[in-house]
Image (cartoon, rainbow, N blue to C red):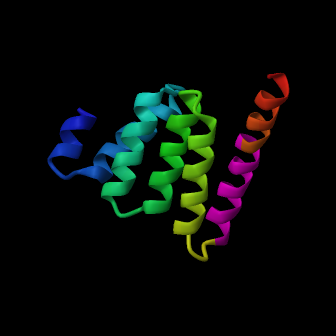
Amino acid sequence: QVNALLKVGQPVKAAKLLQAQLDLGENSRDIYKLMAQAKGDMGQTSQSHVWLAEFYYSSGLLRAAADQLHLAAESAGRNEYELAKIASRLREVENAISEMEDKS
């Protein structure tokens, strides 16, 4: 249903359905990727990058996740609240990268 909504140009409805799935605890890479697409289609570039970062993180691609968070921060402009959330998540991802490097 979400794919159909995105195909017919209904990203807001698609995002609401995806958010409902997330609220129910259904976290999956597919949801993150679709949410990134929906947010991008809505013109919310920063949020699109944030969701794509979650997709990469859940796929084990931590550096790609960090890259997306950097892009999200660049796209956030002067929205201090959004920048703070992005910075916090970026620190978590960078810590995970450091831990992974320490183990190898």
Based on the picture, tell me whether residue 68 belongs to the magenta stretch.
Answer: no
Whole-percent x and y of residue 88? 74, 52
Query: Relative to 40, is 47 on the left or the right?
Result: right
- Nearer to the camera, 53 or 38: 53
Magenta stretch, main secondary structure class? helix
Whole-percent x and y of residue 47? 49, 56
The residue most toward the right is 102
Residue positioned 71% across, 57% down in the render: 87
Residue positioned 59% across, 27% down in the render: 60
Query: Relative to 84, is 22 on the left or the right?
Result: left
Range drawn in magenta = 80-93
Based on the picture, tell me whether residue 85 belongs to the magenta stretch.
Answer: yes
Give the quarter of the image for residue 70.
Answer: bottom right
Give the quarter of the image for residue 33.
Answer: top left
- The mark total stands at 0
Q: Quadrant of the C terminus?
A: top right
Whole-percent x and y of residue 55? 50, 36
- Nearer to the camera, 96 or 87: 96
